[in-house]
Image (tube, rainbow, N blue to C red):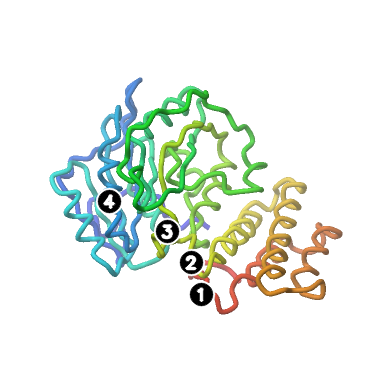
Amino acid sequence: MKTGLFDSLTTEVTNAVGPDKSVHLQHSNSKPCEGIGPLKPDVSFVATFYNKEDFIPNVLSAIFAQKDVGDCEYIFIDDGSTDNSLAVLEECSNNRDNVKIITQKNAGPAIATNVGIDAATRPFIKFCDGDDILHPRATIELYKALKQFDVGLAWSLGEVVSANSEKMDAPDLPLSDEKPQLLANPIERALKLAIFNLTCVLAKTETVRAAGGCDPRVFIQDYSFTLRLANQTDFVLVPSILNWCPTVEKTNNRASALAGGSQVLHDLNAALAYFIYDHPNMDTNVRTKMLQRATSRAWTWVKRQENATVFSKEFCRYLNAKIFPNIGSAFDRTLATCASFRPDRGVRIPPTAKG
């Protein structure tokens, strides 16, 4: 059930962001969406931060330095940081127009991203994780591909680099000569992998809202976002590296490193389960692939991490999904696999989650 994630901002900012959030408007002369010119997109840049004080100066510098963009706004969400992230955000945003800094109690990247989506007023949203660096032409190259193919989302390649790499200074490196590639019916590919993280994405605001944004029942946002958007629009790939991400060991609060890596796998299966729940009339073959993917992932995990045998419940679930995919509730069977990643691992589960 939708919970008003994308209601328009009211004149009272505190009402717009809720009782546990506050917003700072810096030099705000933002205006509602009014369309775009033919060459330069009007963009809402949405970036979330949790204990990223060391990365924020470079992250914001790269966002503010985006080339060939139109009338833009910058929405930064501090997700309950316990370091100096908020102070650094305010300092680095000083004297910038159209900046909104929203603070909230720590709720995780999915919910924080939805807060940013809710606040966006431009026709396009460019996402950025709190420690990722954008190429100076990231936004315009994605925009050109999106317009060329008339789809709701464009994404690029990214590269994982050392936190000390010169690429973390957003160099204007040459782009690939390869042409953009249309990915029709992306749900099939989304069954196999998340396709992208949000930093790789530029999307139409109306498409993101029609999809429901990120699933607030899942802590990490990338895969649920992929599934939801894949159900709304075709994608187009810009085959150039347009962002850089620091290695996990250099940023130990990155979501992908949580719970020894099991958070990601847990959330992949949870995203599949909730997608099944939200689409009871989906194609049977797609639902079967989702169930089998989830049970295979859980079985592989416990086999490698816990030396589980064929007598384990994970193997039984995996085998049953292969032989009897259409018996019982696919949602319940898929959600049950999430428990395999939880024991004593500190996996975070949003309060909105089921089961």
Amino acid of disc 3: Pro
Q: CA distance from mark 1 to mark 3?
A: 16 Å
Query: Where 221 sits versus 108, above or below?
Result: above
Q: Secondary structure at mark 2?
A: helix
Residue under numbered circle 4: 10
Residue 18 sits in quarter:
bottom left
Q: Residue at x 24, y 51 (%)?
A: 57
Amino acid of disc 2: Leu
Q: Residue at x 58, y 68 (%)?
A: 354
**Quick one: label 3 or label 2, which is nearer the N terminus?**
3
* Label 2 close to label 4 by CB (< 8 Å): no
**Quick one: label 4 or label 3, which is nearer the N terminus?**
4
Q: Is residue 250 visible?
A: yes
> Which callout, 4 or 3, points to the residue nearer the camera?
3
Label at residue 109: 3
Residue under numbered circle 1: 346
Residue density around tag 2, few if under 14, some if 14–19, many if 20 or more, within 10 Å: some
Residue density around tag 4, few if under 14, some if 14–19, many if 20 or more, within 10 Å: few
